[in-house]
Image (spheres, rainbow, N blue to C red):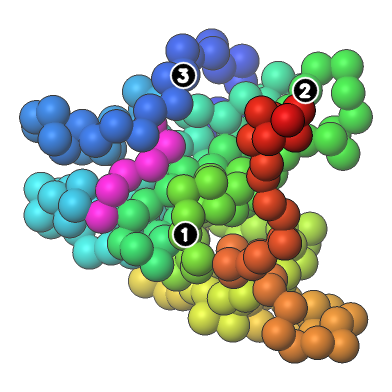
Amino acid sequence: RGLVSAGGKRPVSVNIATLSSFEEGELAEDGGISDGRFVLSADEVTALMETTGLDIDALLLHLVNPAATLARPPISLFHVGAVGLGASGAVYIGVNLEFRRLPLATSVHAEQFLIVNLLAHGETAVRTIAVSAAPCGHCRQFYSELGCADELRFIFGDDPGVSYTLEQLLPKRFRPTDLLDDPGVPLLLQPQDNDVSLTPSSAVLA
């Protein structure tokens, strides 16, 4: 996991920005992540690769520690960052969140935060996920719910140059297909129609 510090790290002011700093001028080496950005566009990712000379896997790992500075773990003081490459070529950030006076079971894992970030920006798949070490068993099962689970790659900071599939990290896992009778049911990140229609309030009152 993306551990930055186990000590009392002072909180930083987070501005959840999705506006492109690439369009505004020179791109910081971390893409502005340490300043509170949670999304890098595909163009920014390409620019960062050219600026740093890193390939995509190395760049994702390079961004793990800056991402972890955005975590909010007031209970464990264990900062985790996850960096994912979406199908569009954009890069997304996930961090762990803990809540004082609530059980740790209510915490949000960085890998879960990452998926919600991808979903909020319309991504239909995640290709590669970088963390500094292998995710916990809970998150491995969570990722089994993805429609792209079989194509997903994991890379870790403590094992550079090597990638892992979910099957390697969680063999003989419980899959959605073990429970669902209809193989066409959309899974996480896959587009779906909830058959919901919105009616203007004026029409209802008429």
Of the numbered discs 2 and 1, the one sitting upstream in the chain is: 2
Q: Which amino acid does label 1 sit on?
A: Glu
User: Image point 38% across, 28% down: which residue?
Assistant: 17
User: Image point 76% across, 28% down: which residue?
Assistant: 205
Of the numbered discs 3 and 1, the one sitting upstream in the chain is: 3
Residue 189 in the magenta stretch? The answer is: no
Mark on residue 99?
A: 2
Question: Looking at this view, is 192 or 155 the one in front?
Answer: 192
Q: What stretch is highlighted in magenta?
A: 37-42
Of the numbered discs 3 and 2, the one sitting upstream in the chain is: 3
Query: Does residue 193 appear left or right of residue 28 in this picture?
Result: right
Query: Does residue 163 appear left or right of residue 47 in this picture?
Result: right
Q: Position of residue 175 (x, y in %)?
A: 79, 80
Residue at the spot of label 1: 123
Q: Where is residue 169 in the image (x, y as percent from the top left)?
A: 66, 74
Decide: few, some or many residues near mark 1? Use Cα within 10 Å; few <14, some 14-19, many ≥20: many
Q: Which amino acid does label 3 sit on?
A: Val
Decide: few, some or many residues near mark 3? Use Cα within 10 Å; few <14, some 14-19, many ≥20: some
Determine whether label 2 and label 1 are within 8 Å by CB: no
Q: In which quarter of the image is the C terminus?
A: top right
Q: What element carries label 1?
A: loop
Q: Give me the C-alpha separation between circle 3 and circle 2.
A: 17 Å
Mark on residue 14?
A: 3
Query: Does residue 42 appear left or right of residue 137 in this picture?
Result: left
Looking at the image, is mark 2 or mark 1 nearer the viewer? 1
